[in-house]
Image (cartoon, grey):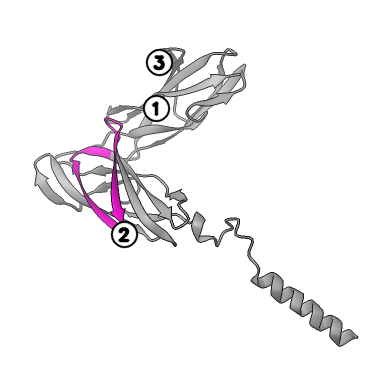
Amino acid sequence: MKKLLIAFAASLFALAGCSSDGDGGEGNSNTQAATPSFPENNSECTTGTEVSPTQSKITFQWGAAPDTQTYFLYVKNLNTQSSLQYNAGTNLSYEVTVEKGVPYSWYVSSKKANNSVVQSGVWKFYNAGAGVANYAPFPADAVSPVMSSTVHGPAITLEWDGSDLDNDIADYKVYIDTNANPTTLKGTVTAETLPNVAVASGATYYWKVVTTDEAGNVTASPVYQFKVF
């Protein structure tokens, strides 16, 4: 009897070890994203082919994501906030002509065999330009509240993510009000957060962060928006 019980327990263990619920666990290939590799995050890109005095070609590269049928590369000019999509097929690289001396962000979306789409992390870089001694900060990214979200008042904390190639950010100026282009300066801080911002119930707010570095370079973020319960 004891041998039978041991054998039965072993068979159950084997069945459990081989089972899969298919719900997108850590090993599920349908949830695995491509891995960006070049241009490197928060870097100056100096490797490219010159097209003109103002443009160069950069070959974007990424690591494979399992079960991907098509990779889509997204490249955004952070000065103009204009974004372009490129169909890379099954390739793990794609060459794009970009402007010199301009900050960009980029990521890769993987269209899977089951038609799901998984996005990689977003990376930023500067495309190298001639004679640049100090680079302007990257535009700040909103962390909280996220774009178009709804929050509870009467006071909130604004949070963002700032970065600079030269690592010399001096301060952040935060503007927030109910105008689509906010002009009310709420605070100047060195941290990436502004607590205790008073908000009114039922109102829609717009906010942006203007980053200044030690060299006097100034970069404004996009305008972010949220609504208050």
Q: Which residues are magenta?
A: 77-103
Q: What residue sits right under mark 3 in the picture?
A: 180
Q: What residue sits right under mark 1 in the picture?
A: 171
Q: Amino acid at mark 1?
A: Asp
Q: Position of residue 102 (x, y in %)?
A: 23, 37
Q: Position of residue 140 (x, y in %)?
A: 39, 32
Query: Which residue appears farthest toward the left when viewing the image?
Result: 52
Residue 112, located in which quarter of the rendered image?
Answer: bottom left
Whether residues under marks 2 and 3 lie with C-beta atoms below 8 angstroms apart, the answer is no
Residue 173 at least partly seen: no
Q: What residue sits right under mark 2 in the picture?
A: 92
For this view, does 3 lie left or right of residue 146?
right
Q: Position of residue 151 (x, y in %)?
A: 58, 24
Of the numbered discs 2 and 1, the one sitting upstream in the chain is: 2
For this view, does 68 lie left or right of residue 202?
left
The CA distance from mark 1 to mark 3 is 23 Å
Q: Amino acid at mark 3?
A: Ala
Q: Amino acid at mark 2?
A: Leu
Q: In this rendering, is residue 145 above or below 180?
A: below
Name the residue at 75% across, 78% down: 11
Q: In which quadrant will I find the C terminus?
A: top right
Query: Pointer 3: residues within 10 angstroms few (<14), some, or many (20+)?
Result: some
Name the residue at 14% across, 39% down: 131
172 or 119, nearer to the observer: 119
Choose mark 2 or mark 1, whichever is in front. Answer: 2
43 or 199, nearer to the observer: 199
